[in-house]
Image: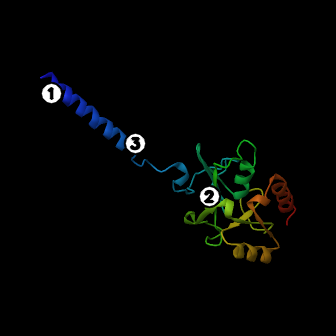
Amino acid sequence: MNKVYSRASRLLAGVLVCLALAACDQAGPPPASEAPLGFHRGDECHVCGMVITDFPGPKGAAVGAGGVKKFCSPAEMLGWWLQPENHRADVKLYVHDMGRSHWDAPDDAHLIDARTAYFVVGSGLKGAMGVVLATFAEAQAAQKLATETGGRVLRLEDIDQKVLGQALAMSSMGH
């Protein structure tokens, strides 16, 4: 009888180990970085605390291990991200593609990676407080806006705190 219990115990232990290993291999919920993003009524900007949807123009979102931080504009997001404590490669940055969205109501279905986006500064378009950066997935769309408005096209690596400060000074002078 002990042999039967011993064999059954080992068999049961083996089955439990197999089940545990199989469970470890199961796909869990998608990481925060792959979760769908969206800007909803009442969402507040991580930097200024204002209601994000109260402003026209593209928005920004930073997704990292700590979750999603939403911003009322790409400039607010970049100002936050450029701070040394936030400037990490593991943070994914998203902005609206304004080549596929209406300025007054950007479509969350057209969020793009900010690291590959084209930014137009100095366009004179209205947006959230501070610097207005129009964001595009395609260089041609960004260049068209820049040509029409006297703005200039930048890439993410061209933008630093100095650029954001200069653009803010230009926009407050009525440019």
Element carrying mark 1: helix
Farthest-out residue, top: 2
Percent across and percent down for residue 105 are 61, 66
**Near-viewer residue (149 or 11):** 11
Q: Is residue 97 left or right of residue 82?
A: left
Mark 3 nearby-residue class (10 Å; few <14, some 14–19, many ≥20): few
- Spatial separation of the CA atoms under disc 3 and disc 1: 30 Å
Toward the front, the furthest residue is 3
Q: Identity of the amino acid at label 1?
A: Val
Please tell me whether mark 2 sits on a helix, a strand or a loop.
helix
Report the residue marked by disc 3: 24
The answer to whether residue 56 shows anywhere in this view is: no
For the residues labelled 3 and 1, say whether their Cβ atoms are less than 8 Å apart: no
Tell me: residue 34, above or below residue 99.
Answer: above
Name the front one of labels 3 and 1: 1
Q: Which is in the foreground here, disc 3 or disc 2?
A: 3
Q: Nearer the viewer, mark 1 or mark 2?
A: 1
Dot 1 or dot 2, earlier in sequence? 1
Q: Is residue 36 above or below residue 80?
A: below
The residue under the point 56% across, 63% down is 108
Q: Position of residue 149 (x, y in %)?
A: 79, 74
Residue name at image x 24 percent, y 33 percent: 12
Q: In the drawing, does residue 12 fall left or right of residue 49?
A: left
Seen at 16% across and 25% down, the residue is 3
53 relative to 145 in the view: left or right: left
The image's mark for residue 53 is 2
Q: Earlier in the sequence, mark 3 or mark 1?
A: 1
Which tag, 3 or 2, sits closer to the chain's start?
3
Q: Label 3's element?
A: helix
**Badge 1: residue crowd in 10 Å (few <14, some 14–19, many ≥20):** few
| Residue where numbered disc 1 is placed | 4
